[in-house]
Amino acid sequence: MVVNSLTILHPLFEGMILGITIAITLGPALFALLQTSVKHGIKTGISLALGIFFSDLALVIGFYFGASQIVNDKFYHLVLGIIGGAIMTIFGIYTFFKRVPMTEQVEAINEIKVKKPGLIPYFFKGFVLNIANPFLWVFWITSMLAINATYGGDQRAVALFFSGTLFMVLTTDILKCILANKIKILGNPQVKLWLNRIVGLLFMIIGSFIIAGSLVEYYKGFSIHMP
């Protein structure tokens, strides 16, 4: 019973680590969330966050069923795991050394009252803003194939992993909306620099974990079939 619980929690917690890493990645979605929450209030910000979440969910579910059809051979597990882990590691190195943009700033609320828009338009804005990002498609499909490879095609483990990831992304996005006025410091170039370094390092660690996990799964399966 204890072993079964650990088997369930292991991929869930690993997915949550990826979710936290995504959550602190600086990008258009993060600044859109902060700007919206500061200008139009927490509810509008959360509506945007839900749109972003459902676009992530749509991509993950689509790639989940696609990956289960593509990744059905141990050797493909290994190859895709190494490629996916390498891409994530390279992205981590790029993020670690990336120059900090000076343009993305979170504006304070003006004294003039801003008319609050409806919640539904902001839900769709978040959905479109996120799903129209080509990097996001590459990121999710690479992650899905790599994690499939890491867990040897175990669909339950993969589902638990990405459940943990998406749960953390949504939770932290809602927290960003609630704390938007207090975390405008993210517009500070020095803070951006250190966040990039932390995110880059975490992606490098996750990439290494994916490569190592894929190698372990492959050679474990190989040894089982040895005479």
Image (cartoon, helix red, strand yellow):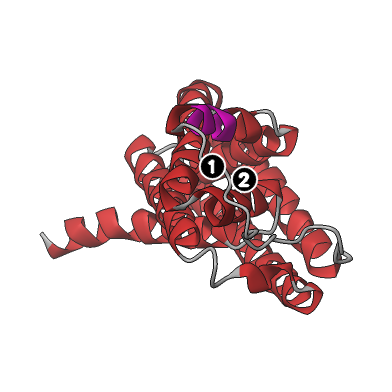
Q: Based on the picture, tell me whether residue 24 belongs to the magenta stretch.
A: no
Q: Residue at x 63, y 53 (%)?
A: 112
The residue to which callout 1 is attached is: 149
Tell me, yes or no, if residue 59 can be seen here. Answer: no
Magenta includes 123? yes
Q: Is residue 194 above or below residue 98?
A: below
Q: Residue at x 66, y 74 (%)?
A: 185
Q: Secondary structure at mark 2?
A: helix
Q: Which residues are magenta?
A: 121-127
Horizontal arrangement in the rendering, residue 210 relative to residue 64 (left or right): right
Dot 1 alpha-carbon crowd within 10 angstroms: few under 14, some 14 to 19, many 20 or more: many
Name the magenta segment's main secondary structure: helix
**Looking at numbered disc 2 in the image, what kind of residue is underneath it?**
Gly
Q: Which residue is depicted at the point 66% across and 41% down?
A: 139
**Label disc, if present, on residue 81 of the rendered structure:** 2
Spatial CA span between label 2 and label 1 = 5 Å
74 to 98, vertically: above or below: above
The reply to whether the C-beta atoms of the residues labelled 2 and 1 are less than 8 Å apart is yes
Q: Is residue 62 visible?
A: yes
For the N terminus, the quadrant is bottom left
In this rendering, the answer to whether 11 lies above or below 102 is above
Which is more toward the observer, 78 or 68?
Answer: 68
Q: Is residue 41 left or right of residue 193?
A: left
Q: Amino acid at mark 1?
A: Ala
The percent coordinates of residue 82 (x first, y second) are: 68, 48
Residue 43, horizontal then vertical, whole percent: 41, 46
Instruction: Name the secondary structure under disc 1.
Output: helix
Quadrant where the image shows the C terminus: top left
- In the rendered structure, which disc, 2 or 1, sits on the residue that comes first in sequence? 2
